[in-house]
Amino acid sequence: MEYVAVLLPSVVVGLIFWFAMKSIFNADKAERQAEARAQAEAQARSNAQPDTKAENHASPPVRPDAES
């Protein structure tokens, strides 16, 4: 019985450490997944928007004071 009394504190501290590390790794995994989803949504949003800069460069701007 004295072996249990000697080893029990170490086992309990080890289990607490294991649960703490498990929760940290799960939180990190969830954060990386959320960041990947946010980046994918931003990429999809930027691909869905028309490129207005390319349209502006296609035709020269009309100057109101230009003589025709």
Image (cartoon, rainbow, N blue to C red):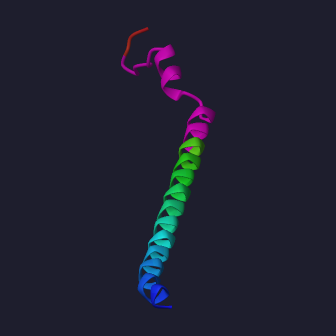
Residue 34's place in the image compared with 43, above or below, is below
Q: Which residue lies furthest to the left in this view?
A: 65
Residue located 46% across and 85% down the image: 3
**Residue nearest the observer in this picture, 66 or 20:** 20
The image shows a total of numbered marks equal to 0
Percent x, y of residue 15: 49, 75
| Residue 43 left/right relative to 53 | right
Q: Which residue is at a point 45% across and 74% down the rendered structure image?
A: 14
User: Left or right: where does residue 41 sit relative to residue 65?
Assistant: right
Q: Splitting the image into 4 quarters, where does residue 60 fall?
A: top left
Q: Nearer the viewer, residue 42 or 51?
A: 42
Residue 43 in the figure: left or right of residue 65: right
Counting from the top left corner in percent of width and height, residue 33 is at 57, 51
Query: Foreground residue, 9 or 45?
Result: 9
Q: Quadrant of residue 65?
A: top left
43 in the magenta segment:
yes
Say above or below: 22 vs 55.
below
Q: Which residue is drawn at 53% across and 55% down?
A: 29
Over which residues does the magenta segment extend? 42-65
Q: Which of 31 and 8 is in front in this view?
A: 8
Relative to 44, say whether 53 is above or below: above
> Magenta segment: does it hold 55?
yes
Residue 29, placed above or below residue 16: above
Quadrant of the frame with the C terminus? top left
Seen at 45% across and 90% down, the residue is 2
x and y percentages locating residue 32 in the rendered image: 51, 52
Give the residue at the far top of this rendering. 68
- The location of residue 41, given as percent across then percent down, is 59, 44
